[in-house]
């Protein structure tokens, strides 16, 4: 596994701005992005848009983002990855 680049950007959802950091990782034939906000792990998403979770990155499961907001964030991430990362 090779750590590639980190991309930082903001996403606005329901009047809230979420500061996201995408850490790109290359596993040879599979590229994924670990997504963090405020230093906390949110989700891992593949270049193809598959949603994954890394238990090793989940430091405090009690602070999981609101599922509705997380689903919307994932959709925004899919669009951004498809547009910017391909």
Image (cartoon, rainbow, N blue to C red):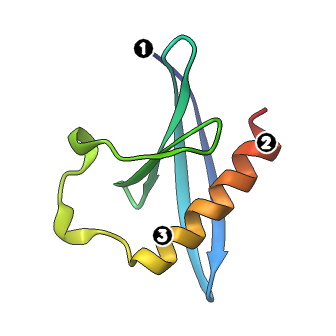
- Above-or-below relation of 1 to 66: above
| Percent x, y of residue 84 | 79, 42
Q: Which of the 4 image quadrants contains residue 74?
A: bottom right
Q: Earlier in the sequence, mark 3 or mark 1?
A: 1
Question: In terms of secondary structure, where does tag 2 sit?
Answer: helix
Q: Within 10 angstroms of label 3, few (less than 14), some, or many (20 or more) residues?
A: some
- Above-or-below relation of 75 to 52: below
Q: Earlier in the sequence, mark 1 or mark 2?
A: 1
Instruction: State the separation of the CA atoms marked 3 and 1.
Output: 26 Å
Q: Which of the 4 image quadrants contains residue 39?
A: bottom left
- Above-or-below relation of 66 to 30: below
Task: Write the residue at 52% across / 69% down.
Answer: 71
| Percent x, y of residue 85 | 74, 36
Task: Write the residue at 70% across / 44% down.
Answer: 81
Q: Earlier in the sequence, mark 2 or mark 3?
A: 3
Task: Write the residue at 55% across / 63% down.
Answer: 19
> What residue is disc 2 on?
84
| Percent x, y of residue 61 | 19, 62
* Horizontal arrangement in the rendering, residue 71 relative to residue 11 (left or right): left
Instruction: State the separation of the CA atoms marked 2 and 3.
Output: 20 Å
Residue extending furthest toward the top:
28
> What residue is disc 1 on?
1
Q: Nearer the viewer, residue 85 or 52?
A: 52
> What residue is disc 3 on?
70
Which mark is drawn over residue 86?
Answer: none
The quadrant the N terminus occupies is top left
The quadrant the C terminus occupies is top right
Question: In terms of secondary structure, where does tag 3 sit?
Answer: helix
Q: Nearer the viewer, mark 2 or mark 3?
A: 3
Question: In terms of secondary structure, where does tag 1 sit?
Answer: loop
* Horizontal arrangement in the rendering, residue 53 relative to residue 19 (left or right): left
Instruction: State the separation of the CA atoms marked 1 and 2.
Output: 22 Å
């Amino acid at each position: 596994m090779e750590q590639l680049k980190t991309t930082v950007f903001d996403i606005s959802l329901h009047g809230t701005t979420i500061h996201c950091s995408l850490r790109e990782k290359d596993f040879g034939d599979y590229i994924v992005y670990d997504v963090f906000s405020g230093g906390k792990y949110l989700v891992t998403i593949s270049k193809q848009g598959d949603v994954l979770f890394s238990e090793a990155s989940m430091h405090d499961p009690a602070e999981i983002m609101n599922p509705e907001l997380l689903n919307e964030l994932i959709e925004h991430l899919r669009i951004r990855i498809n547009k910017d990362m391909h």
